[in-house]
Image: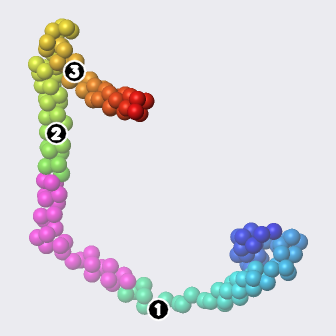
Amino acid sequence: MKCQEIRELMPDLATGLSAATSETEQHLRACGECAGKLEEFRKTMALLDEWQAPEPSPYFDVRFQARLREEMAKPAGGWLHWIRRPALALSLVAVLVVGISFFHGDGNVRQAAVNSPANVMVQPGTAVGDLQTLDKNDDLYSDFDVLDDLTVQQDVTANP
């Protein structure tokens, strides 16, 4: 057995929840570090078994109930309490109005873009149609410049 496996079993071995197998005992005899840690675990568990929780004060419940009655009898937080709820409601309404206006306004912008003269397709082969095709394929045509540069470089290296 490996030390890591023994370390995982140590809490159960120290409390007596599981019995040590022959393989575990064999490792503990051979490995002084694991045996020392197991002994430390057992000492810690023994100390924890001896520990007793302190008793609460006999007047704890009486004082607690009195404090609860005092807090319940206090008036609510003053002017801040009255302002807090309406301010929260107004801010929520403002957020909703702004959000709805963004969604509503965004749809109008899209509709205007669809109906704009720039998106009207023209017959291919005309000057306007050719310009629209060049605009749409600008990225593709810009890569042709890179290919032209490569062919020039290859020609230069092939014909020194």
Residue 107 visible: yes
Q: What kind of element bears circle 2?
A: helix
Q: Amino acid at mark 2?
A: Phe
Q: Position of residue 62 (x, y in %)?
A: 39, 86
- With respect to residue 57, does 30 lie above or below? above
Sooner in the amino-acid sequence: mark 1 or mark 2: 1
Residue 139 seen in render: no
Where is 81 relative to 132, above or below?
Answer: below
Q: Nearer the viewer, mark 1 or mark 2?
A: 2
Residue 95: x percent and y percent? 17, 49
Q: Which comes sooner in the sequence, label 3 or label 1?
A: 1
| SS state under label 3 | helix
Residue that badge 2 annotates = 102
* The magenta segment: 64-91
Circle 3: is it few (<14), some (14-19), or many (20+) Cα within 10 Å? few
| Residue at numbered disc 1 | 57
User: Is residue 2 shown in magenta?
Assistant: no
Q: Residue at 16% of width from left, 63% of height from top?
A: 84
Element marked by disc 1: loop
Q: Main secondary structure of the magenta part?
A: helix
Query: Relative to residue 141, is residue 85 drawn left or right?
Result: left
Q: What is the C-alpha distance between the residues marked 1 and 2?
A: 61 Å
The residue under label 1 is which amino acid type? Ser
Q: CA distance from mark 3 to mark 2?
A: 33 Å
Residue 108 or residue 159, whichever sits in front: 159
Residue placed under numbered mark 3 in the picture: 134
- The answer to whether 22 appears left or right of 129 in the picture is right
